[in-house]
Amino acid sequence: MRQFLCYTYAKSSSFGYSCREDFVYFAEICFKSFGDRITNWITMNEPNLLVDMSYIRGWYPPAHCSPPFGNCSAGNSDIEPLIAMHNMILGHAKAVKLYRELFQLKQGGSIGIVGFTEYFEPLRDNEFDRQAVSRALAFTNAW
């Protein structure tokens, strides 16, 4: 639950900074402890899906949302998803920087982030459907 609170309530720079530093500290422990056995590191799995389900739809903890996206007791679906994703991306970037500077050369691994994506195909072979697919891919995958 701490990770959700860190990302949601990181409105003060000191608190947001602390959460990101906690994440980097955790990543460093993992790199040191398991780097001799793991070569492919993923900092976060599908953070865009987590943000959508937690701060837009309100289905995952902390269940924050606002109309018209959902009927939650708290939250702002216009701002909180951006704050949460911003802090997750900064935490990811700091962990990647740490790995590349201190561990990658010795351990020989790679590091990245996994985003949730969807794939669409045109229903019919016409320009209207191809443009609809292009918009759907941009909306779901390009943010």
Image (cartoon, rainbow, N blue to C red):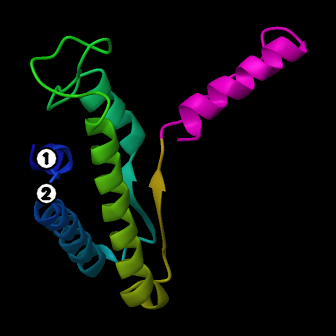
Q: Is residue 101 visible?
A: yes
**Range of magenta residues:** 116-143
Gap in angstroms between the C-alphas marked 2 and 1: 8 Å
- Say if 115 sits above or below 109 in the image: above
Can you tell which quarter of the image residue 14 is in? Answer: bottom left
> Which residue in the structure is indicated by mark 1?
9
Q: Nearer the viewer, residue 43 or 137?
A: 137
Q: Is residue 83 above or below residue 31?
A: above
**Magenta run includes residue 117:** yes
In this view, the mark in front (2 or 1): 2
Residue 30 at x, y = what percent?
A: 25, 71
Up the image or down, 87 lies above or below 34; here it is: above
Q: Which residue is denoted by mark 2 in the rendering? A: 12
Q: Residue at x 34, y 71 (%)?
A: 95
The kind of residue tagged 2 is Ser
In the drawing, does residue 42 fall left or right of residue 137?
left
Q: Quadrant of residue 75?
A: top left
> As rendered, which of 78 and 26 lies closer to the eye?
78
Front residue of 54 and 66 = 66
Residue 46 horizontal/vertical position (percent): 41, 42
